Image (cartoon, rainbow, N blue to C red):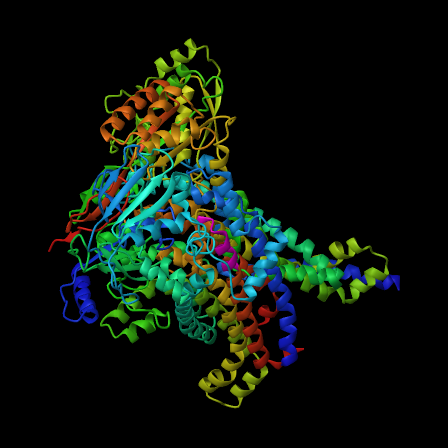
Amino acid sequence: MSNDAVTAIAEPQVTRNRRAAEFWYYFSENKGAVIGLVVFAILLVVALLASVIAPHAPSAQYRDAILVPPVWLEGGRAAYPLGTDAVGRDILSRLIYGAQYSLFIGVVVTTIALVGGIIIGVIAGYARGWVDTVIMRVMDIILAFPSLLLALVLVAVLGPGLLNAMIAIALVLQPHFVRLTRAAVMAEKSKDYVTAARVAGAGHFRLMFKTILPNCMAPLIVQATLSFSNAILDAAALGFLGMGAQPPTPEWGTMLAEAREFILRAWWVVTFPGLAILVTVLAINLVGDGLRDALDPKLKRS
Amino acid sequence: MLKKLTFAAALATATILSGAASAKTFVFCSEGSPEGFDPGLYTAGTTFDAAAHTVYNRLLEFKKGTTQTEPGLAESYEVSDDGLEYTFKLRPGVKFQTTDYFTPTREMNADDVIFSFDRQMNKDNPWNQYIAGGSWEYFAGMGFPELIDSIEKVDDMTVKFKLKRKEAPFLANVAMPFASIMSKEYADKLEADGTKEKLNQQPLGTGPFQFVAYQQDAAIRYKANPDYWNGTQKIDDLVFAITTDAAVRYQKLQAGECHLMPYPNAADVEAMKANPALKVEEQEGLNIAYVAFNTTQAPFDKVEVRKALSMAVNKQAIVDAVFQGAATPAKNPIPPTMWSYNDSIQDDPYDPEAAKKMLEDAGVTDLSMKIWAMPVARPYMLNARRAAELMQSDFAKVGVNVEIVSYEWAEYLDRSKSKDRDGAVILGWTGDNGDPDNFLDTLLGCDAVGGNNRAQWCNQEFDDLVTKAKESSDQAERAKLYEQAQVIFKKEAPWITVDHSLSVVPMRKEVTGFVQSPLGDFAFDGVDLAE
Amino acid sequence: MVRFLFGRLAVLIPTFIGVSIIAFSFIRLLPGDPVALLSGERVMSPERHAAISAQLGFDRPIVVQYLDYIWGILRGDFGTSIVTKQPILDQFFALFPATLELSFCAIIFAIVLGIPAGIFAAIKRGSFFDQTIMGTALVGYSMPIFWWGLLLIIFFSGILQWTPVSGRISLLYFFPPVTGFMLIDSLISGQAGAFKSAASHLILPTIVLGTIPLAVIARQTRSAMLEVLSEDYVRTARAKGLSPFRVIGIHALRNAMIPVITTIGLQVGVMLAGAILTETIFSWPGIGKWMVDSVFRRDYPVIQGGLLMIAAIIMFVNLIVDLLYGLINPRIRH
């Protein structure tokens, strides 16, 4: 009996290496995903080296250069490649520093939502009974509100600001992870290797997080990429509504909100921050699509 | 674009009012939705523009473009010798508006006046609580419950107000929107129908325009009141197009979708002035932004310290950075458009060197202080945070270290009242009734310490002057007293007076007859559109 | 079916109670004293403050306030706005048709373009056409719609001057609302040009709000079609020599539509979230803008009532989608 259990546990370990190779094969098949990954890597480098790359400090105001158009337009200046905003700040530099904020928001929000979601989801899926019911009802309640509206009201409760916006968005994205984890745990729990591990005397904690969880990571990874791009979009939307990062922070959504009054006078102040958001989110979604194709066996077949 | 619209307008109105193809529609891109249509219940200027200045009149009105009163629904008034009785003679022959929801059968009389005030002061009046959660904010705010002893009907066309104490600003107060005269006959009908709340939804008064419809958060429609006692308007229809975003208001003005807009973005004003289709009118607003020291705490209890800090602030820089020039540096606690403004007063010059020396002479070194910055934009201070940052660097030049603090708005207002508050507070005031008392006594009187008097400053000499001015009913004498009070204020410097913001009104070239109100109202009686 | 319905309701009711508790407690957690805000810079005397608090019921124990609130809702009374003093339900019903009309147009826009695009992409799988459509869909799916709206305004309203800047209809037209839908009301009114004006005001907001659902529907249709096309019965039908049109039009499409319908149902929540941004950009007088304005005005009862009603709508639509799904696909009932 105990011998059976050992082989049953060992089996997933062996397949994992094979899976990784297979995964990379399918992922690199998808050209879009590779492009997305490259763009994302570039963004990451830009964000990390912002203070080296950026030609100006993000909040330095050049009073002699207010609303200067981009360099290729008449009146543009080489010192401000993408032009300046209403108080004479270099837009390119602000966008470069803004990459730091967006990626930071994505990482922090996804981590909070993922870790929180996994813990709650595993507990619900493993414990079942009333604990499960209560947890799932609470998740239903959160999902009953449109996410942006809930985040907006939450930020109003907590006070406008980047940190509170991140907390609110993480909370709103959480239920998806809880539901996924719970479903996966319930599916895995009834499988033989789990039963075997339990019989072999593995404790609850070990069973939950060491035995079952690694086997339900695929959908969670895909969901995490989705959340990453959603977090960036929602944070920018909150910034746009005046409830996210506060001026003069060079967060892209906040920059858009400040630029709104110039839409008919200085298109570049409005266009570039939005373009930066779009490119970032698009890159992450491309990677997400690649991940899903590579991890989801059903789509692989078709 | 414009041509197309006028053509469409002609078509549209032709179908509405068959025959009147040349109807003139004036569109005002207003900045927000009205809270309701009963001016007594609210305090926002947006609501007053939509209800009080269109549909209603008051016993006295502010003369256009001034803060002086002139006869309105009262033809004349008399003040008793003891200053406690005000007798108003009503204007005969004033008709209430005839609308599709009500047809009046009688003209305005004393019953209407008494109804309009009694509902706000008498808890037993059936209209005192006709809106759940409603309260008579301005009536209470102007101290009327404690001021008015009784209102009597002398005869059909005469009403007598008895006051509990002498109060000269009373006359300005009855010209305020909350004192609008409603129709008792209309109210009685609504009460009989069991639809009292309609008074706040379908207003009916004696004013230049009558209410047609309100499309929530989109538009309010009026048409000229054909029976208006002061002459029918030149425009036929008036529309308030509710447009909360200043950039969008500007776009609509450019496109000819509206004729006049309030509150432009400071950044757009230059372009507006350059646009040949538009004209821009500017006027100092009836407001003041100030930094109030806590004058009860050391070292701010010393006049020299307050004076020195006042000299350390570069007001022009604040005006430029926060208002892009759409404000003027302030030297007095009341704005220049207000009567009794003392223009002979010299402002403290911006002089960091002298300021630093004054502080040293006063024995103040290594001073650290807090400056409170409001979390919200107000007309008198669009960005308190930015202003505070500028002051921080100004004060650093004279060796004073500043920490900027801020609280949530309601908390800010509440905490800043406290007598043992730590720090100087950025705050301001927008005048209600154009009376200097509304600034000088309300904000700086001894009674207001621990309340509106954020400087916690009680100067007996100053207080005597403003109290005396309040009780006198001779305006020339009052003006003199207020001028003296401003001299004392400047000498004592309980505030750093920062700025009076300009009210900037862009409109299309064809608009004629619009007069800016120093009170910040937008009233459209008398406007016309040139061909 | 009936058992299924009751099963769903048994889950919905506790959820709704939870939603009401959340909405109710949120606004009590909001910082700032709503009563003090009424008077702004003007100082309110403590007695008056207490009187108004009592009038608004803020002085009673929180549980009593909550039960009162629920009792009110059961009688159709959602309270009154602190700012406007108008009943919240009246405001909601005055504004909801605007949001409904916009959402409806947006979803139609998304379906009409999204389903054919998805089908063709699936049929021509791997082609340039497929890649273009799916690439565009992913861009749409990644779009920050508040920026998208601004771009469209710059281009179509600013440069080309084709479309109006904001609002639902030119102010020169006025007629009393009959249905609340401007497109229909403008036709009923019989005023020349009114319909055209209403339609031109709808174009940009529809595109902006419809962008993300369009992308989602196109992607979902494509993958559902791909799945169905690989099923045995479709292959059999093809092998039997049925025309491709019949195979796709009758057999494949019907089965592929099941997940697509679910997707469309799920877009309702997305739409209401999108309406917050779209309505703000275009000054569209609907409930999304109403909620944003109320948050900024700290109009607590409105935020509370609005949250509750919006959640109720989403739950209701999800229930309908579930039931429809159960009707189409009897297997999931148990």
Q: Decide: is B237 above or below B260.
A: below
Specify the segment rendered in magenta: C297-307
Q: Position of residue C181 (x, y in %)?
A: 36, 70
Give the left or right position of residue B460, taking residue B52 as reference. Answer: right
Viewer-side residue, A272 vs C209: C209
Q: Quadrant of the N terminus of chain B?
A: bottom left
Is B347 rendered above or below residue B251?
above
Q: In this orientation, does residue A23 appear?
A: no
**In which image quadrant can residue B329 be found?**
top left
Q: Where is residue B167 in the image (x, y as percent from the top left)?
A: 33, 34
Dominant secondary-structure state across the stretch colored magenta: helix
Residue at horizontal 45 percent and vertical 50 percent from the top? B123
Q: Where's residue A168, x and y in %?
A: 55, 50
Query: Which part of the image, by quadrant, shows the C terminus of chain B?
Result: bottom left
Q: For this rendering, which residue is in front, C238 or A149?
A: A149
Q: Is residue B154 left or right of residue A296?
A: left
Coordinates of residue B121 in the picture (x, y in percent): 41, 47
Q: Work out whether residue B224 can be spotted.
A: yes
Extreme residue toward the left, this view: B531
Q: Nearer the viewer, residue A50 or C214?
A: C214
Identify the residue shown where x is 21% and y is 68%.
B12
Which residue is farthest front? B154
Q: Nearer the viewer, residue C149 or B306?
A: B306
Name the residue rendered at 46%, 76% in the picture.
C123
For residue C3, side relative to residue B526 (left or right):
right
The answer to if B320 sits in the magenta stretch is no
User: For the image shown, how many numbered marks are present on the structure?
Assistant: 0
